[in-house]
Amino acid sequence: MLDLTGIPVVDNHCHPVLLNQHLDGVQFRGYCTEATDAIFAEEHIPNTVYYLWLLRQMAIFYGCERDEETILEVRNKLATDALIEHLFRAANIDTLVLDPAYPPNSECYTPERMGQLGRCRAVKMLRLETLMQQLILQYSDFDDVVDRFSTAVSRAREDGFCALKSIVAYRTGLNIMEWSKDEAVASFEEARDEANGWEQFRIAHKPLVDFLLHIAFQHAAELQLPLQFHTGYGDSDTDMRLGNPLQLREVLERRDYQGMRIVLLHESYPYSQLGAYLAAIYPHVYFDLSYTIPFVDKLEMLAFTRQALGVAPASKLMFSTDGIHIPEMHWAGALRGRSVIGQVLDEMIEADEIDEEEAYHLAQQILHDTAYAVYKL
Ligand SMILES: [Zn+2]
């Protein structure tokens, strides 16, 4: 068995954890599903293979019985700082690449503090749609929004961001198109009307979003700033037909965008084969292998890891957890990632495709080296 525990991981996509970690069963389960309907946390999550595995791991870690009630009781007794410290250090993390746009900052540990507690580096990315949303609420003039957006993106590196991120997949779709300025302005007016008097304003105005994204792509290409795209499985309001990474074709084909390294997040699940294929073909496309979210079981993780390693170079693959809310997710994803990648590489040794030394080198790239190169860590 290939032992990958000694390789410190770069978690190339994850989120901050909550300040308040005192959780009851329903709350805890609510963080272990991407479904928003309350029935999942109340009834269905305990019957999910992923959740049963997580409880089993937590019971081992906390040294208690395997039932949810006992586990949460033991966990809730720990001070939150100590909880994060124990879990992150056990995970052997080199760097966290955080998307701090969600959950809201006021409810979360800062990236700096997470890094201190985990004794690791913490760097952050800039989420484009959140920036758009803020600017649309702030400015009534389209040109002002465009100016501010363009300036913020062009300053991203100086402002301490090592990447951009787009969630357009679950707003208006990955089929990002070219729109005239007039079309974008009309779309902006609609967005402004809607935003007016609505606190929960959510930008989903295609010509406007696509128009601003193209501005971001130009800067990203010039600055050689990587951009992470959410692809596949995600929020329950995703139109999964538009979350297919093949929808990105127009953007991928643009010659002038080749300087922008594109990271397809969440193994594009369930479009994993398609996403990995894109990383095998386009020089600037990278494929993220995420081992906490989507919440799938080990057999499914083995499948997408085989698909990725089966077609794409390991220097195009990167480990992540998409851990969010609770530190168990970052920890569990690291455990899981090492074990799944190790098992797949073992199979490849067994199949006489590679030898042990090569396998270890490929693992090192996925868990650590590729992300170092992409984010210039
Ligand atoms: Zn995420």
Image: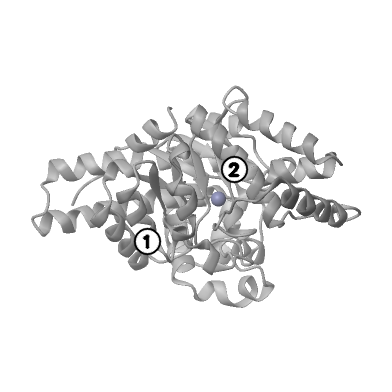
Q: Pointer 1: residues within 10 angstroms few (<14), some, or many (20+)?
A: some
Secondary-structure class at tag 1: helix
Figure disc tally: 2
The amino acid at mark 2 is His
Identity of the residue drawn at 52% across and 62% down? 243
Relative image position of residue 31 (x, y in whole percent): 60, 60
Identity of the residue drawn at 23% across and 43% down? 362
**From where the camera sits, is residue 117 visible?**
no
The amino acid at mark 1 is Leu
Which one is nearer the viewer's eye here, 98 or 283?
283
Relative image position of residue 154 (x, y in whole percent): 61, 28
Tell me the colour scheme of the image. one colour
Indicate which disc, 1 or 2, sits on the residue closer to the N terminus: 2
Relative image position of residue 188 (x, y in whole percent): 78, 50
Label 2 CB, ligand 1: below 8 Å? no
Left/right placement of residue 346 relative to residue 154 reads: left
> What distance separates the C-alpha of mark 1 from that of mark 2?
23 Å
| Contact between labelled residues 2 and 1, with CB atoms less than 8 Å apart | no
Which one is nearer the viewer's eye here, 178 or 117?
178
Q: Mark 1 points at which residue?
A: 274
Left/right placement of residue 219 relative to residue 321 reads: right
Which one is nearer the viewer's eye here, 28 or 99?
99
Relative image position of residue 56 (x, y in whole percent): 43, 62
Q: Nearer the viewer, mark 1 or mark 2?
A: 2
Q: Name the residue under label 2.
A: 214
Left/right placement of residue 200 relative to residue 350 reads: right
Q: Which residue lies furthest to the left in this view?
A: 352
**From where the camera sits, is residue 251 visible?**
yes
Quadrant hosting residue 68:
bottom right
Identity of the residue drawn at 60% across and 22% down? 158
